[in-house]
Image (spheres, grey):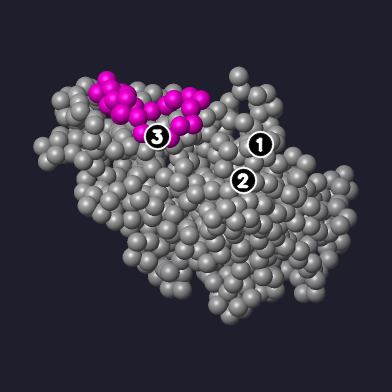
Amino acid sequence: MSTTQTDETLSVITPANIDWQTDDTGNKVPVSGEFGDVYFSHADGLAETRHVFLAHNQLPERLSKLAPQQSFTIAELGFGTGLNLLATWLLWRHLRDTHPHLATARLHFITTEKHPIPITDLTKILALWGQRAPELTELITPFLDAYPPLVAGCHRLNFFTDNLTVDMWFGDAATSLTKLYSDKSIEPTPFVDAWFLDGFAPSCNSTLWAENIFAQVQRLSRPSTTAATYSCAGVVKRALRASGFEISKVKGFGRKREMLTAIMTNAACSESNAIKSDIACDAIEVDISDNVILSESHSVLSESHSIVIGAGVSGLFVAWSLANRAIQVTLVDKSAPLAGASGNPRALLAPKMTPIHHVDEHLHTIGYLYSSRVYRQFNDMAQSESISSVIESTGALDLLMKANIGTEQIADYPDDMATTLSPEAARNFSGLKEQDLATNLYLPHAGLVNPQTLKQIILLHPLIRFQQLTVDSVNETETQISIQGHNKDNAALTIDADNVVICAAFESHDIDKRIFDCRKIRGQLSWFTPTREQLSHLPKIPLKYSGYCTLFTAQTNDDSFDNRAAHQPHFLLGASFIRNNIDTHIRHEEHQISRDKLVTAIPEMSAIIPTDTSLWQGRAGVRTQTPDYHPIVGRLSDSDRMWVMSAMGAKGYALAPICADALVDMMTGTFAPLSEAMLARLAPNRVRLQTPLV
């Protein structure tokens, strides 16, 4: 690959090249093959992290003083082995155990890494830390379980029980920081409370200490933001001063004589006044380490109650994200949760691939990777509640019959996300015998989501209350917002809240005309119970073609089945795609359409799929789609308390979790896991949504 940094090469991640060296005590330590520098102190990396970044950002004191529901944001340059994160996480756990008022406070850890360490090397490195510092062991396993594929862009890792969110931005640090959205004209405004400046030494990797980096540090900070770094290089001191920080030299760790701490003040130094002589710099340094008083006012939430209108997958995830910020949620729907298009028997969660140089701004990839992590966490919750799994890991085979990408364009993706199998391997995985499988895409972490168990897990949250209600009107004042409607007994009901989020799919426009009147697309899924003979010839894993098909086993909590069907295999196929139609009655002709689509794509299925569809079951819903195929996510124009999340199309189970988190980040003044450009593409008032559909 060319070493010239084009837009395309910047989006292809080059993993770290790990060299192993023996330190002074005989221990093996990792060294960067790219930069020739150690990842952590040869003496004691954990103690170094605690000294440099935790103590000299005053984190024990500052975190312990957070108010209920308050959020604290740390940003790190240079994730490396993750030791800084683990040390911070351990401190956060200890503080939450010893300070009950932190139960609803939240820690947000944002980190950047251009050359992330492959999972095999990272597992080896962290296993060594588990031996040296056994207190880290209970954190290493969940972190490695959540560690993302080495794909450019933001990867959000939520550790719900610890109220910890980790955003890992893979790629060039300056580019990643530029993507963080912080509009200081809007309240509440996201900002960084503390910086971990932990790049390799300036002499080894000058890019992490460059002017464009510190321009972003300045943009994302505010008075009272602190920074700490092991480096005392003149370039670092000058850059911090030019960015508005007052700096102080303090005792370094171990053999290192000095390190720097800094705090942003109201009077930012201009670059033209930055003193270029190290001697002159020393003369004006101020000691801030002992007596600094920090004014913490970050994201203390006054919004204690929100209403979510619509209990499909979008509404469920908005409710979940709000509740995980300690906000009371009333989830309302005119009938019941998952009564609309989201309530199909199963949803296939599989990535919609894009050429890798687009991946960091590809919503479906970002959403798929995040959803996969969230659903696996929900599986753990389901197990503890003796509920069926939320996601069944099946893998899937994409036959690339309706794709905008070929196998050569995904060659740079990690194999654990997508790979091309040999025709023989593809036949073994899929069970197909006659299909030409020379062109295929195997998706090893794809799976089947069970919407009913997902609903159960989300509605178990103690801060979420469901209310059956048909909404008649919404009224907003300066101090609150209220909805008026009638329940199933036709009794009038009014509910007051601090915010309202509309997640009512194609009916969202009826509730508020500021929401774009989207295209309505009827989709019907079909399924039947195969005979033993049919079962032996049906595909063994989900297949994607111009539709998708899959075997699945019904569970006792599947609302679409009676108890006699529980634990029986079913074969699901579809879906139909009928524009401008909101009828949801089952149509036998659409069973036939789905059958024809399948046997056209995979002719060997024509002898296996029944031609008589009269006993088939089905479910129809209405998808909502925008002209640019992007969802609608954000605050409505001319409103302080009205929000919308809608128009997921057929990708709700992949997109809703990340979009819901981004929406709640906007509502609460914290950094979203989507770039500023992506948030603009989702905005309710974007240009593409100013012209009605014809």
Q: Are marks 2 and 1 in contact (CB under 8 Å)?
A: yes
Q: Would you call the spot at circle 3 few (<14 residues within 10 Å), some (14-19), or many (20 or more)? A: few
Say which residue appears at 67% left-offset and 52% top-offset: 483
What's the mark number on residue 256?
none
Identify which residue is drawn at 59% across, 59% down. Answer: 329
Q: Which mark is residue 502?
A: 2
Residue located at (49% from left, 46% from top): 312
**Residue 585, label in figure:** 3
Q: Real-space Cα distance between discs 3 and 2?
A: 25 Å
User: Residue 302, relative to residue 362: is it above or below?
Assistant: below
Q: Nearer the viewer, residue 494 or 373?
A: 494
Mark closer to the chain start, 2 or 1: 2
Amino acid identity at mark 2: Ile
| Quadrant assignment, res 441 | top left
The image position of residue 357, as x and y in percent, is 51, 30
Residue 644 image point, x, y percent? 63, 43
**Front-most of 52 and 630?**
630
What stretch of residues is rendered in magenta? Answer: 576-601
